[in-house]
Amino acid sequence: MSDESKLATGEVLSITRWGDQLFSFTLTRPAGYKFEAGQFARIGLKSDQIPGIYHEDFNPEGQEQIFRAYSIVSSIYDETLEFFSVTVPEGSFTSRLSHLKVGDEVLIDKTPFGFLTLSRYQQPEPQDLWLIATGTGAAPFISMLQGFEVWSHYRRVVFIYGARYQDDLVYFDQLESLAEPFWDQWDGEFIKVASVTREIPAMDDICTNQRITELLGDDDLLDQIGFKPSSTSHVMLCGNPQMIKDVKQVLKDQGLSMNRRGVGNIAVENYW
């Protein structure tokens, strides 16, 4: 199969800017494109796609296309594909991506990637699910919350979202509205926790200005949640690599294990 036959084209349908660096964008979904909630897509730009950007500045190696991995925010049922991105200063890719306009086209690899999916869990049997994210790492979990699998397998779901500032908790206030359509036959608990490290958050939800590693060792805060990660928990981590490394160690110290070949508590996504 040629490289060209592995690619599809997506048209930019909308762009939402959440601040100076964070933005979301939606694309048309290629016909037949299937993915599992939690997976990511490879999005591509052509080096000469944006007027005023010289080829050698964008891509010194001279390649005609450059791809980056983006976790999919959309539900598996949506007719469009939504992505969540941060503009990296001087970044060769995101700085160009952030200047796209409605109607522009980008390349999409037809194959979805990644193993941060609920299907990877075989043991232990589902009891509670912890989704722990920083920044744009929230994307795969937002996709999961818009599907039946979470709500049919777990009685308790905790979403811990970390950011430096409260305004960076993009999607946080929308989580209930995204998930509610699946709650008709569900009588469990859904708990949101905000970890905002550079200011004191003012929110109705459970919140702290501690780091996530500190939060998971704070008995008072865990009492607000009502329970803590245990041997019957499934824990998923996505976001800042240092956060993932540190939280993994905290959870291991608490007796949880990495998920390997379907067995274990902790699953992570490393595509940074």
Image: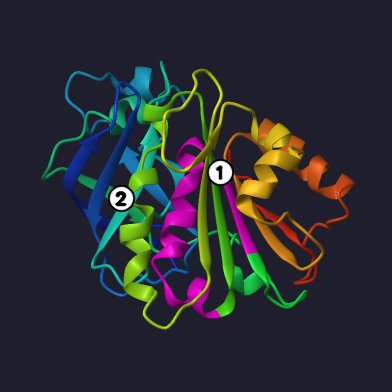
The relative height of residue 207 versus residue 235 in the rendered view (above or below) is: above
As rendered, which of 241 and 229 lies closer to the eye? 229
Residue located farthest toward the bottom when viewing the structure as drawn = 185
Q: Residues within 10 Å of mark 1 (few under 14, many from 20)?
A: many
The relative height of residue 249 versus residue 261 in the rendered view (above or below) is: above
Q: Is residue 146 magenta?
A: yes
Residue 15 location (% of width, % of height) = 20, 40
Residue drawn 53% across the image and 65% down it: 189
In the drawing, what numbered circle is on residue 107? 2
In the picture, measured across the screen, residue 227 lies left or right of residue 202, that is right
Residue 214 location (% of width, % of height) = 72, 32
Q: Is residue 202 magenta?
A: no
Amino acid type, callout 1: Ala
Residue 130 location (% of width, % of height) = 62, 56
As rendered, which of 191 and 266 lies closer to the eye? 191
Report the span colored magenta: 129-152
Q: CA distance from mark 1 to mark 2?
A: 27 Å
The image's colour scheme reads rainbow
The chief SS type of the magenta part is helix
Circle nearer the N terminus (1, 2): 2
Amino acid type, callout 2: Leu
Residue 271 sits in quarter = top right
For the question of whether residue 2 can be seen, the reply is no
For the question of whether residue 179 can be seen, the reply is yes
Residue wearing tag 1: 133
